[in-house]
Image (cartoon, grey):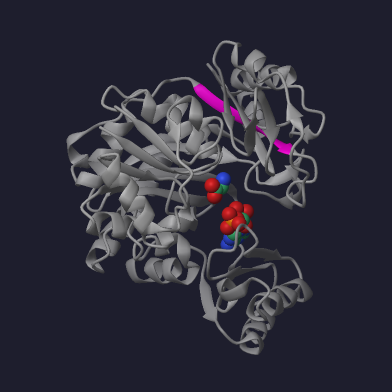
Amino acid sequence: MNILLIGSGGREHALAWSLSASPICDRLFIAPGNPGTAQHGTNIPIDVTDHAAVIDFCRTEKIDFVVVGPEAPLVAGLVDDLKTAGIKAFGPSKAAAQVEGSKAFTKDLCAEFNIPTAVYRRFTDAETAKTYVRNYGVPIVVKADGLAAGKGVVVAASFEEAEAAIDMMIGGGLGAAGAEVVIEAFLEGEEASFFALCDGRTAIPFGTAQDHKRVFDGDEGPNTGGMGAYSPAAVLTPELQARVMREIIKPTLAGMQARGTPYTGILYAGLMLTKDGPQLIEYNARFGDPETQVLLPRLKSDLVTALAAASDGVLDSISLQWRDEAALTVVMAAKGYPGAVEKGSEIRGIPAAEALADVLVFHAGTKQDGDSILANGGRVLNVTAMGRTITEAKKRAYEAVSKIDWPEGFCRRDIGWREVERERG
Ligand code: AMP
Ligand code: GLY
């Protein structure tokens, strides 16, 4: 099978690593890719927002299967256009990608199909929204309806904060994404992520993870795309996972099918484990980043077979095997992230880190410059290790981090702390 993978982050390096290891993968191309993906296939500098160019490339190179990594091309309808052109693709249609593209869409879906989530209201008028908040009380959560690159959620502890968020969003601070807001109840509990592979009718569990969104140790500082993650998430016990499948994932698939927009692809559920049970915080229509970097090293089964079965609607014919080991990834970011960062500093020592047993270094924001690797973004490397426990994986991952010589970068030192404490007992 010739495969084209769309994307250029750490998630795509992990996907490229896993796809290229498949016995049924002949040639792998990545558009646009990064220096990490180039170790597993051929990077192609095409503009993935130009769907006609992607389709042309698929025809020229006889691509059998396209795997879409990020949300933007899904929400833009790339999978629809590929399918219309007769090219098999992994990921939801534009209509189904609304589970991530519109928070109001997902909240309404939950309401219609009885899926546990925080109570909510939708608003397009700032004054009406503020009156609702005044009557409801704080804490309360204000969310922009559309994709806002991680800036669309404000957990407001005071009326002032909630009102400022409403004014910023409806006032156009996030562009069209904030023209409508969802205001919802603040949920208390521990967060965890649950992944399901879906073919429109059938969903099968695809692992669990927890991540660290705040930039500094102790979960302090501004939110980021994720500073590290680990899998499995032991808080999601087998009983809780069964409950998530029964109460959240299956009704979502059934609801999407009933609406005539079946969901195919990976469904990434962000959950709050409340005292009343798991509640849906949000859906993503794609693999997580950096969660994929800890899920895929644990997958024993062939990834290409699994993703193709989802696209072909035959997931009921496969089962997935997972390794018992845990995986943990530490994100190395450029100083200043999640704010402005300098690009172009040199990173040394990646080969020394990769030489350690059970360690994988995934590239996220890097650039090849002759024989050198340069920083080229905010989140730059994902240093990943396996171990019998999260504690062991953490120790190995930080040993690998210590081999990397990059004065202009930083990382959190406490990835996995919750789980390490639990394992210590
Ligand atoms: P994201 O949507 O990924 O930018 O992240 C939003 C984050 O805000 C989540 O990971 C939670 O930590 C928090 N959050 C979102 N909705 C709620 C809620 N209803 N109650 C409490 N925390 C929330
Ligand atoms: N790590 C969070 C995400 O992929 O959205």
Q: Which residues are magenta?
A: 326-333
Residue at 42 percent across and 61 percent down: it is 75
Q: Between residues 80 and 2, which one lies in front from this camera angle?
A: 2
> Is any atom of residue 294 visible in this view?
no
Principal secondary structure, stretch drawn in magenta: strand
Q: Between residues 55 and 325, which one lies in front from this camera angle?
A: 55
Q: Between residues 131 and 394, which one lies in front from this camera angle?
A: 394
Q: Locate residue 34 relative to residue 227 in the image: left or right.
A: left
| Residue 130 locus on image (x, y percent) | 67, 83
| Residue 18 locus on image (x, y percent) | 41, 28
Q: Locate residue 296 relative to residue 263 in the image: left or right.
A: right
Whether residue 68 is situated above or below residue 415 in the rendered picture: below
Where residue 226 sits, quadrant-wise, is top right
Q: Locate residue 129 relative to residue 52 in the image: left or right.
A: right
Whether residue 352 is situated above or below residue 138 in the rendered picture: above
Magenta includes 332? yes
Where residue 323 sits, quadrant-wise, is top left
